[in-house]
Amino acid sequence: MAFQAIIIHPRDNVAVALRDLKAGETLHLADGRTLTVLTDIPYSHKVALADRAIGQEIIKYGENIGHARTAIRIGEWIHTHNLEIKDAG
């Protein structure tokens, strides 16, 4: 089976789309999980693997890259509209 997204690190609560994903399709992950894509997600962008409340961490590469600026549901696109990027300083 060809997977449509990759989880980079076991701690991640996002996966990275390996192609454009369309709302309503079922996403199959290498770890056996499946989820429904809730919003269109462009190639190489993040898809939520867990619900996130406002302020909760977004983990990619096993590291905190920022926090949810809005509530995010599993299967939604994570990008600048709902992600506050962690300050590098």
Image (spheres, rainbow, N blue to C red):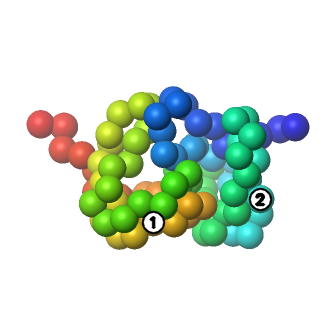
Would you identify the image quadrant in which residue 40 lies? bottom right
Graded by Cα atoms within 10 Å as few (under 14), some (14 to 19) or many (20 or more), the crowding at tag 1 reads many
Residue at 63 percent of width and 69 percent of height: 38
Position of residue 60 measured from the top left corner of the image (x, y, whole percent): 43, 38
77, above or below 28, in the image: below
37 vs 40, nearest the viewer: 37
Residue at 70 percent of width and 36 percent of height: 31
Q: In this image, 48 relative to 2: left or right?
A: left
Q: In this image, 37 relative to 85: left or right?
A: right
Query: Of all residues shown, which one is farthest toward the left?
Result: 89
Residue 26's tag is: 2
Graded by Cα atoms within 10 Å as few (under 14), some (14 to 19) or many (20 or more), the crowding at tag 2 reads some
Which residue corresponds to mark 1? 72
Residue 81 in sight from this viewpoint: no
88, above or below 50, in the image: above
Q: In this image, 35 relative to 51: left or right?
A: right
* Tag 2 and tag 1, C-beta contact below 8 Å: no
Position of residue 61 measured from the top left corner of the image (x, y, whole percent): 44, 31
**Figure quadrant of the C terminus:** top left
Label 2, label 1: how many angstroms apart (C-alpha)?
A: 18 Å
Residue 23's tag is: none
Residue at 63 percent of width and 47 percent of height: 17
Helix, strand or loop under label 2: strand
Helix, strand or loop under label 1: loop
